[in-house]
Amino acid sequence: MQLDTAKLESLLGTMVNEMGAAANAALVLIGDKLGLFRALAGGALTPAELAGKTGTHERYVREWLSAQAASGFVTYDGGAGTFTLSPEQAAVFADEDSTVNMTGGFYSLAAVFADEPKLTEAFRNGKGVGWGEHCNCLFCGVERFFRPGYKAHLLTEWLPALDGVVAKLDRGAKVADVGCGHGASTLIMAQAFPNSEFVGIDFHEASIAHARELAGGLGNVRFEVARAQDYQGNDYDLVTLFDALHDMGDPVGAAAHARRTLKSDGTLMLVEPMAGDSLAENLNRVGRIFYAFSASVCVPASLNQEVGAALGAQAGERRLAEVVREGGFSRIRRAAETPFNMVLEARP
């Protein structure tokens, strides 16, 4: 077989880049846990100074800094022998309140690698891997990865794009946030709309326990352990599912139950990963991330439940609309979108 040298060199170049990214992923996680990125955001430091500020060993820190500089995650000043973060690097790696902080995704990556043996066996036998069977760092990683996007868009763009919903929330509405995980979306809404009542619902007990801790003394929110297909309550003005429907074994059942628990003029809000309706439309950088996590987390979670519909994280608007329509909704539209998410509004 004759190899095309130009194509081979291009592929090998891509592979070098990929191996560097994979090798550095654990170091990003370490830098976040040890506060190395946050310390660098305060100004230029030598390796010894950074080690001193963070209580770490200089020789490890020196190599860590070199890896981050080579990755473009840290800025190196060769003349001064110091390292620092640009404002953009700080926003992505160091600022917990930044709407573009991306460090949470690296915790989820750690879970994927830790759970690889389970996933390999699932590929062989076709069975699922339950959400609760994953390494714990997956759950905090999911919260930290999605929370910046929710903070950036939920109150300013997504809820206002829904017909009449913000006015209801201002007056006082009843809201169920289904598949809430650690409750990031629930708490953002509850803090913004004190006249409304919010309940966060998830079938993963450990996530609900953590959400209750995060809620503190907030009086208009509670968290309950329940499935999307049979949670308690009715007469909700708004039911939300944030990046959750595609993970469910019975998404039609979840949509149907949401329909039963809504008021006649209520709204179902679906926030799902951005995707086109065909594979060809999703062969891009965003689709690549979502397909990878879909194969590792989303599809296995669905196959472990009820029907095992396995929609996947790149189901696309058309397929999602079909599911919601089967659940009893007649009016469905895309209300908003970002490079990472689409927001669908469904009405009875």
Image (cartoon, grey):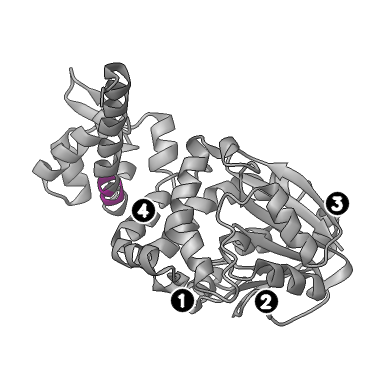
Q: Residues within 10 Å of mark 1 (few under 14, many from 20)?
A: some
Identity, as a three-letter code, of the amino acid under mark 2: Gln
Q: Residue furthest left?
A: 59
* Earlier residue among tags 2 and 1: 1
Residue plotted at (75% across, 54% down) = 321
How far apart are the two marked residues, 2 and 4, measured between alpha carbons? Answer: 29 Å
Please state which of the two labelled residues, at mark 2 or mark 1, is closer to the viewer: 2
**Which residue was labeled with disc 3?**
163
Answer whether labels 1 and 4 touch (C-beta < 8 Å).
no
Mark seen at residue 206: 1
Q: Residues within 10 Å of mark 3 (few under 14, many from 20)?
A: few
Q: Residues within 10 Å of mark 4 (few under 14, many from 20)?
A: many
**Which residue was labeled with disc 4?**
109
In the image, residue 292 lies at what x, y percent? 44, 49
Residue plotted at (27% across, 23% down) = 3
Please state which of the two labelled residues, at mark 2 or mark 3, is closer to the viewer: 2
Residue nearer the viewer, 223 or 254: 254
Screen quadrant of the C terminus: bottom right
**Which residue was labeled with disc 2?**
229
Answer whether labels 2 and 1 touch (C-beta < 8 Å).
no
Q: Is residue 107 magenta?
A: no
How far apart are the two marked residues, 1 and 4, measured between alpha carbons? Answer: 20 Å
Q: Secondary structure at mark 2?
A: loop
Give the answer, above or below, for where 164 lies relative to 282. Answer: below
Q: Which residues are magenta?
A: 26-30
Identity, as a three-letter code, of the amino acid under mark 1: Ala
Residue nearer the viewer, 4 or 253: 4
Specify whether 41 is left or right of 233: left
Give the answer, above or below, for where 328 lies relative to 61. Answer: below
How far apart are the two marked residues, 2 and 1, measured between alpha carbons? Answer: 19 Å
